[in-house]
Image (spheres, rainbow, N blue to C red):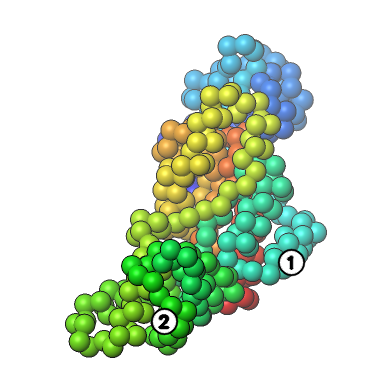
């Protein structure tokens, strides 16, 4: 689990302060309201006077773990408080066997292994947590081309139908430099299937570049036509990189702390534009295990008011994607973290079985 330095906070907080902080955060996550000393006295199980609890709360506030909203005498956790809670005080709750079986069932019912499966998993994460679920598409190196066919369209266009090794079918409409007859397209497909089947799309692009460097006299007419058509099909921007599917964004409107219209508008724009979230997910691809970004820890201003919990999913012990949850900093971490972790493992197993 990702851990952030809390500047010696472990030493600064004695056991009593830690128990009161834990009780405060758990109550605030559950109720969403500032927590007063009377509530803490009841929830912590400690035999302490209200005056003693107020003194401890003052110390925690001075250390930056809690703060007092100007509208209430109670206190709420800060980002630093949540981080200490997640790193030190949190007791994770394993998912019940029935919940694990339900996730497995949903994955098994989704026959495909490409975008359709990713969309299904993102919707599942969203429905289980009532937050926003997101899943990156598997790394392009994970799947290979099984077969390609072409269908001639009007205006010098053609439909390229690519069957991938994970049973996903990708359709791309390409604009050709000239009219190609169905017979020419069939010969081009035959050549491309012979030359490129079994290779990943990045490998196909590299092979195309290598072949294009060959002199024209080394290629017959069919090869030249096939390479030119393949250029149109496989020419993809290198910056495309990670791509993700998100579901349940509107769930975030149900949390009072995220209900500010302007804040939601900016957050939804980030979901649509994807740049910042893609960079964050890309960094998670190269990290180990569960990653938790609380508020400003993500480094992206648009995510300052939310927490992001991610886990990588793997095939053949290689990380090929990331999935996760976006929700308020006041999320039930003890439940969300196991959901993300278990779903990542089960998605990896499902993809392994469908290779």
Location of residue 158 in the rendering, given as x and y in whole percent from the top left corner: 46, 69
Label 2 residue SS: helix
Report the residue at 65% width, 43% height from top.
Answer: 248
**What residue did someone put label 1 on?**
109
The answer to whether any part of residue 57 appears in the image is yes
Location of residue 194 in the rendering, given as x and y in whole percent from the top left corner: 42, 87
Picture quarter containing residue 233?
Answer: bottom left
- Check contact, mark 2 vs mark 1: CB within 8 A: no
Which residue reaches farthest right?
98
Residue 248, relative to residue 16: is it above or below? below
Q: Residues within 10 Å of mark 2 (few under 14, many from 20)?
A: some
In this rendered view, identify the residue nearer to me: 62 or 161.
161
Residue 286, relative to residue 150: is it above or below? above
Report the residue at 20% width, 87% height from top.
Answer: 217
Query: Which dot marks residue 128?
Result: none
**What residue did someone put label 2 on?**
184
Would you say 98 lies left or right of 355 here? right
Q: Residues within 10 Å of mark 1 (few under 14, many from 20)?
A: few
Location of residue 131 in the rendering, given as x and y in whole percent from the top left corner: 65, 41
Would you say 161 lies left or right of 341 here? left
Q: Earlier in the sequence, mark 2 or mark 1?
A: 1
């Amino acid at each position: 689990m990702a851990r952030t330095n809390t500047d010696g906070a472990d030493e600064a907080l004695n056991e009593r302060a830690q128990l009161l902080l834990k009780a405060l955060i758990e109550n605030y996550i559950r109720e969403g309201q500032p927590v007063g000393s009377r509530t803490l006295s009841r929830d912590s199980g400690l035999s302490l006077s209200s005056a003693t609890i107020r003194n401890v709360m003052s110390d925690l506030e001075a250390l930056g773990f809690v703060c007092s909203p100007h509208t209430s005498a109670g206190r709420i956790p800060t980002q630093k408080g949540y981080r200490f809670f997640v790193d030190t005080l949190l007791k994770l709750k394993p998912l019940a066997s029935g919940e694990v079986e339900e996730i497995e069932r949903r994955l098994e019912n989704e026959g495909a292994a490409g975008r359709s499966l990713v969309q299904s998993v993102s919707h599942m994460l969203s429905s289980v947590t009532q937050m926003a679920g997101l899943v990156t598409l598997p790394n392009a190196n994970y799947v290979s081309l099984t077969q390609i066919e072409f269908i001639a369209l009007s205006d010098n266009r053609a439909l390229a139908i690519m069957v991938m090794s994970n049973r996903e079918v990708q359709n791309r409409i390409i604009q050709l430099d000239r009219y190609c007859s169905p017979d020419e397209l069939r010969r081009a497909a035959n050549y491309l299937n012979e030359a490129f089947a079994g290779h990943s799309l990045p490998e196909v692009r590299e092979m195309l570049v290598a072949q294009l460097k060959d002199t024209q006299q080394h290629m017959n007419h069919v090869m030249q036509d096939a390479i030119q058509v393949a250029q149109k099909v496989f020419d993809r921007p290198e910056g495309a990189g990670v791509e993700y599917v998100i579901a349940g964004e509107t769930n975030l409107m149900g949390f009072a702390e995220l209900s500010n219209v302007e804040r939601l508008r900016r957050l939804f724009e980030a979901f649509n534009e994807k740049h910042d979230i893609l960079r964050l997910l890309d960094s998670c691809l190269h990290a180990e295990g569960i990653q938790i970004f609380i508020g400003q820890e993500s480094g992206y201003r648009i995510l300052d008011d939310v927490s992001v919990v991610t886990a990588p999913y793997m095939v053949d012990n290689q990380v090929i994607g990331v999935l996760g949850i976006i929700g308020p900093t006041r999320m039930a971490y003890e439940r969300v973290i196991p959901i993300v972790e278990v779903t990542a493992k089960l998605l990896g197993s499902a993809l392994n079985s469908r290779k």
